[in-house]
Amino acid sequence: MASLMIESLTKRFGSSIAVDGLDLKVREGELVALLGPSGCGKTTTLRMVAGFLPPTSGRVLFDTEDVTRLPAHKRATGMVFQSYALFPHMTAAQNVGFGLEMRGLGGAERQTKVEEALRLVRLSHLGGRLPRELSGGQQQRVALARALVINPKLFLLDEPLSNLDAKLRAEVRVEIRALQQRLGLTTLLVTHDREEALTMADRLVVMEGGRVRQIGSPRELYDAPQDAFVADFVGRCNILSGRRENETGFRTESGLVLPVDTAPNERDNANAFALRPERIAIQPGANGDLNGAVEAVTYLGSQTEYHVRIGREVFVVIQQTPGADEPLAALKPQDQVSLAWDRKAPRLVPQTSL
Amino acid sequence: MPASLFAPLTERPSLNRVLLRTLVVIAYLIIFAPVTMIVVTSFFSQEIVSFPPTALTWRWYVNAWDKPEFFRGLLTSLQIALIAAAIGVPIGTAAALAIVRGEFPGKQAISALLLAPLAVPGVVAGSGLYMFYVLAENALDRDIKATTEGLVAAHVLLTIPWTVRLVVASLQGLDRAAEEAAANLGASPFTVFRRITLPMMRPGIVAAAMFSFIQSFENLDLSLLLVGPGRITLPVAMLNYLEFRIDPTLAAVATVQILIVGVLMVVTDRFVKLSRVV
């Protein structure tokens, strides 16, 4: 395994810029996720690391080796593609063995390694099948085994879970993460799914418009986003425009004053108030500082989501679903409620418009 | 054709459905009627075809066998079709690769040009080639028209548009990620082409080879002016026979021809599901 260093990497397509001066280091054994909406440059970045796309400028290094000009087939990365990209005319075992064959590994040794890799993804019994005879989840595991068996310097995952159904996705997510940690794989993961990124990554890179918005651990990004885009992209968030009123308050554009401790995150250009829905407490009855009316109650199983209107603002509140005999359980639209939160919970961040 | 067309009916069929089925049956009848008629009449014993047959006989097949021009024509046609497909399919495949994968000026124009022979009537193309061959013969001082080489060259023109069309279609449906995956696993560009791209193109190429063969094998109009003595193709031999006689011998020869093409399609379909490619 190697570490990955990306230095002011830039890719232009004609007049449009897909990746704009990206700097990133992935330590050995670390899983870093590139997260962002489609068109943010995350896939382009991955393709430049794999060697499928030449960068316009900047460098890519594996450990200290500059691979920027090295063609894809000499980079020794192991990539799992969104479509899995299995070779349709080869069996699962032949797919897995292809990389070893390219490395000149023959007969018995190759077969042993292929069997080992198939066992790793629990597919030993299906090695003789063609890809079209395998389910989506099985194809995905063949793709994993094929990428891992060559003992790559770098493990690259391009939206590896997006073609699986929701239940399987949650399982495979955990499996890949466990495998990655056990084998100590230096991994670059591209995804647009925030849940996938939050659960799998050691560090997250939130990208937009070819630029990095923020790099940090999942917790840092969730709790301390640097701007409204990151706040909104890594999880649900109440974002209200306005300005800082004083050290304990933020005034929204509609004139509502919201409690917040402004000292720790004071920023000159902070013109948005960001607060996670689960950080808001809700009480029946209009007897607090922030009183409003319930607009909607959505039951989500373990959690319940409330939409509460205070003046011209609507807050999203998410709470553990109350027991059937608790007072909260009786809340219905039009009911009066009061909202409250820890003053340290909200962040004041700049609104982001490019 | 939609699969639901022949799905078991669980409720009363609607009028639309009945209408659709009727149309499909009529369409099949129109397609298969002439073929069936040829096969059936080849066994009628009377010389002038009339219903009902007075008796059934093999004698037209025996008659066809006894006429050397048919057997020689069959061999010539098979030979020409095989050579033309063997030359045209690689050329067409290379052209299809260039069209789909390449970036060069005039790509659209070349693509249109390669498909153009499909739009030119065979007799027109044949006359054009005839005149071209005459000019070339004068310039090069050697025979071209009425030679096997000249006929093969003409038939290669038939095979290229079919190959380009079928292989372009198969290339466009090909998952490029598989090629990238192979490169990612350490395969050089040439190895990627040999081990991944080419096998994935196989259905398109097999279908192209079959259609090319059939196009050449049953071609009459383009060949008419280009065949020479001793090198008459089967369709031309049949036309020649028709000028002097009308009897079920031709039906017998045509039945053999249909049989050859039919067997070829069934065999090809075993390797490549044609419905997926064409």
Image (spheres, coloured by chain):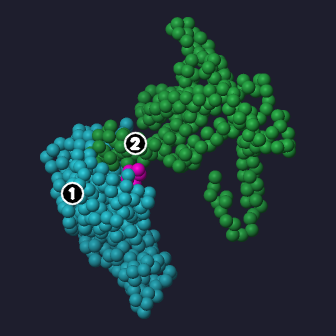
B57 vs B267, nearest the viewer: B57
Q: Quadrant of residue B179?
A: top left
**What is the span of residues highlighted in magenta in the rendered image?**
A83-89
Chain bearing tag 1 is A
Note whether residue A225 is visible: no
The answer to whether A150 appears left or right of A230 in the picture is left
Q: Nearer the viewer, residue A127 or B228?
A: B228
| Alpha carbon separation for disc pair 2 and 1 | 30 Å
* Percent coordinates x, y for residue A328 in the rendering: 42, 86
- The residue at the point 50 percent across, 47 percent down is B271
In this rendering, do the residues under marks 2 and 1 share a single chain? no
Relative to residue A164, is residue A207 depicted above or below? above
Looking at the picture, how far across and down is residue A258, in whole percent?
A: 34, 72
Amino acid type shown at disc 1: Thr
Chain letter corresponding to the colour green: B
Q: Chain A drawn in what color?
A: cyan
Main secondary structure found in the magenta portion: loop
Tell me the residue that label 2 is attached to. B197
**Element class at badge 2:** helix
Give, as a three-letter code, the residue at label 2: Thr
Question: Image point 52% across, 37% down: which residue?
Answer: B209
Q: Chain of mark 2?
A: B
Badge 2: how crowded within 10 Å, few (<14), some, or many (20+)? many
The image shows residue B20 at horizontal and vertical percentages of: 73, 55
- Is residue A84 shown in magenta? yes
* Residue position for label 1: A186
In this rendering, the answer to whether B110 lies above or below B137 is: below
